[in-house]
Image: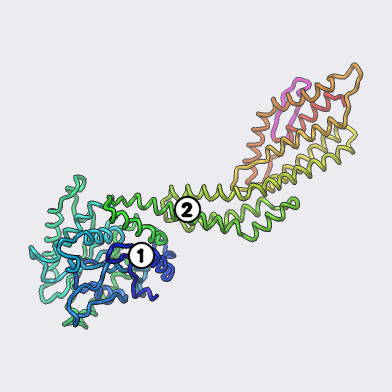
Amino acid sequence: MKMEQGMQLIDGNGKFNVDGLTDFMTATEFAQSGLSYAIVAIIGSQSSGKSTLMNQTFHTNFEEMDAYNGRGQTTKGIWIAKCSDIDPFTIAMDFEGTDSNQRGEDDTAFEKQSTLFALAIADVVLINMWYKDIGLEHAASRPLLKTVFQVMKRLFKPRKKTLLFVIRDHSKTPLEYLKTALLEDIEKIWAAVAEPETLSSAPLREFFNVEITALPSYEYQEEKFKEQVAQLRQRFVHSIYPGGLVGDREEVEPASGFPLRAEEIWKIIKDNRDLDLPAVKVMVATVRCEEIAGEKLKCFTTDEDWLEMKEAVQAGPVSGFGGAVSSILETYLSEYDREVVYFDQEVRNEKRRQLLSNALMVVRDAYDTMLMHLYSNTVKSFKTSLKQSQNVAAIHLCSQSCMSMFDQGCEDAAIQQSEWNASKFREKLICDMLSEMMAKYKVSPEATTLLKPEDCKSLWMNFIEQINPMVTGARSRQDGRRRTRSYAAAAATAAVATGAGAAVVGPAAVVDAGIVIFLRAMRL
């Protein structure tokens, strides 16, 4: 499909062409435009040369009326096409005539619906009108202008649009005179249209940038017509830049959301509901951000580097696990951020949090497996060292070394985007180290023994209960430093057995203090 030839977006019965628009977006790569695009629509009476004007101005190929076959309806419904060789990316929309005989005199529903759609979707609305209609009370263009102004009240806080009046078949009357007369007509119609209370005193300029141009007859002055159309075309080059033809760009939405936005707006219009554009904006942002988040999650779960890391950790500890996984996660989070940057901030932030949460759910099993390997290896190393330890000093060194090894492994496994810590594994490790010591050393039966065997474990559990707040604080400080990959030196002076207080800096120091108490209680 040649996109300059156009695609019927909405047929004569009001049916929205979802599949056709999807193909159009793909073929034109419109979605990649971000905010750098403009949409131009044209409305006007039947057989007034709307399609011809669009084709001449934007180098499109909308179907035109064949004058030799009589003046009848050519364009049915609403058509769109990509404008050729215009920067920014520009979409042209050709609308069915507003006074079509084929629809009958009383059938104005589609006229109002399509006009409202044009004002809601387009940045610039061309109003094609005859030169002879200016100043006439019963001119063909007056009902159209009345319709345009009436439907504005159905737009909830619309962004300012540009209305470009194109006066056709202009002859000898000075353009400045025509502009003055037309502006007077426009102001009268605007003032006469019933408006909501909130708009009762609002001037026209708050809703529209009004521009006026004139063209000679295409039929009798074709060369001059084409020359002036070429000048008109230049006004659409760089139209979104400051001072350009396009109006307010503050509320412009990303091109990738155009299909969903257009379909939803048309559905609301067809259902004759009030058109709340901010609500549509949030809806489009929600759907698009969810779609993009879903795409990034799928990319992450199928990423080759992640799959290799996931498989490798099943066999044993993987050096650099945390950094590697964090880097992969950041890649897809950054891609998400780039693709949703122009959508509603609150919506995109919420969907980012959901994306991260879902990605971390995928990672969690591998992370826990990694910590289990660290725990198992540390217990094994401690058992081996414990067998070779003959005194308290040796056990101190053994416990410190093993806890340091475990903490370094946990630091290496840490996922930057998560708030996970190894507390459960660390607590289990502490208890298992204690159990190993209790299994190796026996309490002397001599009367000078400070504690009975059954009291030793009670003493230790009481210590754990009392020291837990300090452990929690130490872990919090340690986790805070984890992201910078540096631990402050940990030191502790524990003399609980003699009644002195303990200063705890890190979890390893807490464990060391506990072991000191345990060994002293055992009188080793």
Mark 2 → mark 1, Cα distance in angstroms = 23 Å
Task: Based on the picture, tell me whether residue 79 belongs to the magenta stretch.
Answer: no
Task: Where is residue 385? Give x, y as percent.
Answer: 86, 40
Region rendered in magenta: 491-505
Location of mark 2 (residue): 290
Task: Where is residue 217? Give x, y as percent.
Answer: 17, 78
- The answer to whether any part of residue 481 appears in the image is yes
The disc, 2 or 1, on the residue closer to the chain's N-terminal end is 1
Closer to us: 454 or 74: 74
- The number of numbered discs placed on residues in the rendered structure image is 2
Location of mark 1 (residue): 17
Residue 236's image quarter? bottom left
Q: Main secondary structure of the magenta part?
A: loop
Position above or below: 391 against 165: above
Q: Amino acid at mark 2?
A: Glu
- Tag 2 secondary structure: helix
Name the residue located 70 percent from the left edge and 35 percent from the top edge.
506
Name the side, left or right, on which 496 lies relative to 22: right
Task: Where is residue 129? Give x, y as percent.
Answer: 17, 69
- The answer to whether any part of residue 45 appears in the image is no
Task: Where is residue 191? Give x, y as percent.
Answer: 13, 53
